[in-house]
Amino acid sequence: MDFIFIEELRVQAWVGIYPREKIAPQTVELHLTFGVPDAAAEQDDIADTINYAEVIERIRGELAERHFNLIETLGEFVVNLLFEEFGAPWVKIRIAKIGVMKGVRRVGVFIQRGREGVTLPPGMS
Ligand SMILES: Nc1nc2c(c(=O)[nH]1)N=C([C@H](O)[C@@H](O)CO)CN2
């Protein structure tokens, strides 16, 4: 398995438990790593891999359209999108709100998960 990473992806998202977070979107920062088949590199064909431009576009579109109370729920939504729509075998994501609390630069959630039966060798994650 090879891994694609996307760092510091900034997206407008509707997320939060407070009224101010329900009337306006806020910027969240995503770091994503997901597995792709080695075959892509062997064949040099975009059809054999996960197109990261499509992943970014899809995440932007989905997060613009729905509200989540919890950052955890938003995180699970992104993980499921990568599993179910893009067929990623393994995913690690980190999603942060920026500057929402005094004295805290970023706060958020970290999720790392493989599809059923997919585990990484020790030291790989
Ligand atoms: N475990 C969580 N705690 C909190 C969340 C959350 O999503 N998960 N969210 C909030 C508020 O929306 C906060 O971000 C606003 O400052 C508080 N606690």
Image: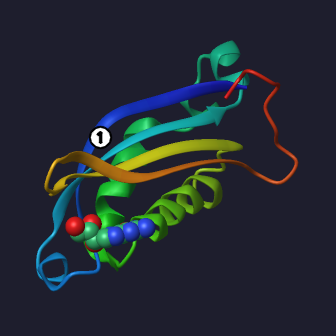
Q: Nearer the viewer, residue 96 or 63?
A: 96
Task: Locate residue 74, reporting x and y percent.
Answer: 43, 66
Of the 4 image quadrants, the one containing the C terminus is top right
Rendering quarter of residue 43: top right
Location of residue 60 in the rendering, given as x and y in whole percent from the top left corner = 29, 56
Q: Residues within 10 Å of mark 1 (few under 14, many from 20)?
A: some
Identity, as a three-letter code, of the amino acid under mark 1: Leu
Q: Residue furthest front?
A: 103
Q: Which residue is mark 1?
A: 9
Give the answer, above or below, for where 79 lies relative to 24.
above
Residue at the image point whose x is 58% and y is 51% from the top: 86
Residue 5 as seen in the image, left or right of residue 101: right
Question: Closest to the observer: 66 or 92?
Answer: 92
Does mark 1's beta carbon lie closer than 8 Å to ligand 1? no
- Is residue 23 visible from the viewing direction of this image? yes
As drawn, which residue projects farthest toward the right?
A: 117
